[in-house]
Amino acid sequence: MSFSKQEIAARAAQEIAPGSVVNLGIGLPTLVADHIPEGSDVWLQSENGILGMGPFPYEGDEDPQLINAGKQTVTIVPGGSTFDSATSFSMIRGGHVDLAILGAMQVAQNGDLANWAIPGGRVLGIGGAMDLAAGARRILVLTSHVTKKGAPKLVKECSFPLTAAGVVARIITDLAVIDVTPKGFRLVELAPGVSEEEVRAGMDAELLA
C-alpha cells in the first residue's frame, strides 16, 4: 500500500499552521485546499492574484473568472481578495508567504529543487516557481516517490535544471514523509504498509533513519 494523492494532500494539510499564508503549486498541491479544516484561519494565496482561495467549486457552481495559477476554477472564502500579479509577486518576494507547497521532478539531498523542466522535454516556462521557492519562508514538496518509468526523484544531486538551491524542508511522497537535513534525507514517517526498504530502493541517495 501507499498514500493516494488525496492522502498525500491530507497529510500535507497537517503541516499548515493556523493563520498561515500558503501558496499551492500546480498539480498535486492544489488538492490540499480540500483538506484544510474549517476555522483554521489559513489563507491560500495564488500567484495570479488571489488571497483567500477556497476549495474547488461544485459542478455547476464554477465561475470562469475565478481561476488559480493552473487555470483551474476555484472559490474564494469570505474576506478573500483579488489583485494584480505585480502585487501578488510583491507578497511572494517580500517574504509574506509562510509556506509554499510545490511539486517536484527531483529533490537533492541538500534541498535543491528541480520542478520546471526536463532536458529534451517540452518547456512551458518556469512560471512563479522560482519566486516561490526563493521567497516563501518554508518549502514543502509533494511528489510521487519515483517517476512513471521508475527513476528516483529523491537524489544525491539534481540532473534537471534547478528551480532553487537548498530550499526544500520536507517531502511527502506516496511512500513516506522525509525531511531534508544538513546530513541528508531523514525518514520521518512511512505510509501504511510500506517498508523502509521500499523507500530506500526508490531513492538515489542515503536515507537516515
Image (cartoon, rainbow, N blue to C red):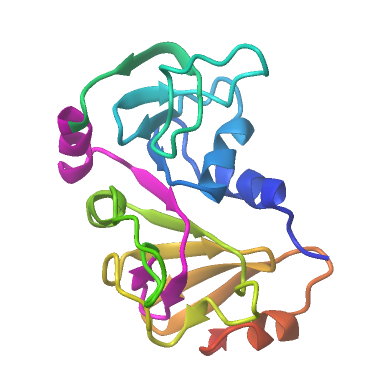
Based on the picture, tell me whether residue 81 belongs to the magenta stretch: no
Task: Pinpoint residue 107: horizontal percent, then vertical percent.
Answer: 43, 73
Q: In front: 63, or 205?
A: 63
Left/right of residue 55 with respect to residue 190 in the rendered view = left
Q: Residue at x 67, y 79 (%)?
A: 199
Left/right of residue 40 with respect to residue 47 in the rendered view = right
Q: Does residue 129 appear anywhere in the picture?
A: yes
Q: Is residue 141 above or below residue 201?
A: above
Q: In front: 3, or 207?
A: 3
Task: Pinpoint residue 201: horizontal percent, then vertical percent.
Answer: 67, 87
Which quarter of the figure has residue 208? bottom right
Count the labels in the image: 0
Q: Residue at x 56, y 49 (%)?
A: 28
Based on the picture, tell me whether residue 88 belongs to the magenta stretch: yes
Q: Which residues are magenta?
A: 86-114
Q: Does residue 209 appear anywhere in the picture?
A: no
Q: Residue at x 41, y 17 (%)?
A: 65
